[in-house]
Amino acid sequence: MPAALPPLRWDIFCQVIDNFGDIGVCWRLACALAQRGDTVRLRVDDASALTWMAPQGCLGVQVLPYDAPWDAAVAPQAVIEAFGCEAPAAYLQALAQQPVPLVNLEYLSAETYVERCHRLPSPIQHGPGQGLTRWFFYPGFTAGTGGLLREDDLAQRQAGFDRWAWRQQHAVAPQALAITLFCYEPAALEPWLQQLMALPQAQPVQLLVTPGRPTVAVQQALKNLNKIGHQPLSDKREQLSISYLKPCAQPQFDALLWASDLNLVRGEDSLVRALWAGQPLVWHIYPQDDDAHHAKLQAFLDWLQAPASLRAFHWAWNGVTAATSLPPISAQVLQEWGDCVRAARQRLWAQDGLLDQLRRFIFEKS
């Protein structure tokens, strides 16, 4: 059970760079803290994604403009600058007058530097925040890191989920191989679609394509493959049926991952949610110009203890090896991948999650 710690008041700063991954993580964190009885002000420079990501809002979470003024009447007890963003100068100046823990919540990685850098201090010696200490807090996959975000009721919600009822409601045939596709523009997309089309007739495939870049990528790939007759909401290509999804709230995205037989995800928030889902997964890591993401992907696959076929698929999917080197998907392969993910999930359940570690850290530094 979570440690019984008193409620806290948080300010979380979030700058939306692209793809809504930053605000997705921050919103989940804010809501998870509110579940504990904390009150959270999410200060964000672009809250537009919350209209579909969290249309009902969350009790205990208030959304404010990024540069909203300091309010001494409800001063925070903890401040998070998410993913390297920096609070406005006027805010830092006010915070320095009554210092509280200032946390830089970093990006997720399985690389070894994470354990070395987790919980390190960085005193602010100049500027409006002079006198404050910024603490680096790293999420991660091992006990020496800050852990992964999971809500207190996650296991209960998953246990009560009826995946067959969900599939029936969303017109996914019981015998179909349901695949969630949430990606950037993978070089291997076209040969992979060809693979799916060529599966035996006894194995229909339903590809559930998320909106935005994944939908555009699939449509372009189909054009490149000279497949015509595209329809706006669905498509049928030999053994492959394609459904184009609408934007959905975070709980509905979780349900999509739980109901699918294979989850191809991207970024940070969806990777964590796919791990908790316990289904076979493939991670499309955010590409970097200097190929630094290759080492990050390698570290993740090593931690995952990924079998050879899963490693080969990741390398091709992420453009490290030739697109044509994708290993074919089969029932045996998916079973192997699923066993691997569930074993990794079991290791994660045995560790303290991000929520517990972060709250304890604040009380320790207060």
Image (cartoon, helix red, strand yellow):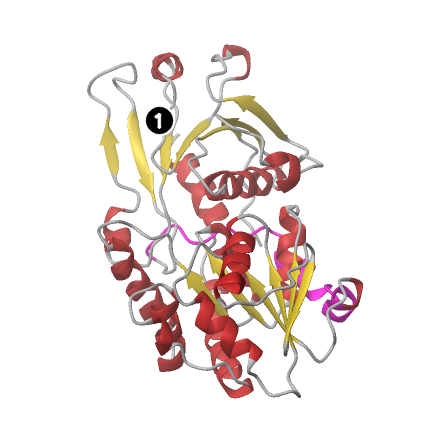
Residue located at (39% from left, 67% from top): 317
* x and y, in percent, of residue 13 in the image: 45, 29
| Image location (x, y in percent) of residue 166 | 75, 64
Toward which corner of the image does residue 39 lie, by quadrant? top right
297 w.r.t. 178: above or below: above
233 versus 120 height, above or below: below
Identify which residue, 210 or 36, lies in the foreground.
210
**Is residue 152 shown in magenta?**
yes
Q: Residue at x 28, y 27 (%)?
A: 133
The residue at 44%/52% (across/down) is 267
The foreground one among 196 and 341 is 196
Taking the image as shown, residue 206 lies to the left or right of residue 150, namely right
| Magenta span includes 23 | no
Q: Is residue 342 visible?
A: no
> Residue 345, percent across and down?
49, 67
Q: Quadrant of residue 215?
A: bottom right
Q: Quadrant of the C terminus?
A: top left
Type of amino acid at the residue the image marks with label 1: Glu
Q: Which residues are magenta?
A: 144-167
Q: Secondary structure at mark 1?
A: loop
Where is residue 80 drawn, in percent x and y? 42, 32
Residue 48 visible? The answer is yes
At x 54%, y 16%, the residue is 74
Quadrant location of the N terminus? bottom right
**Which residue corresponds to mark 1?**
86
Number of numbered discs: 1
Check disc 1: other Cα within 10 Å, few if <14, some if 14-19, many if 20+: some
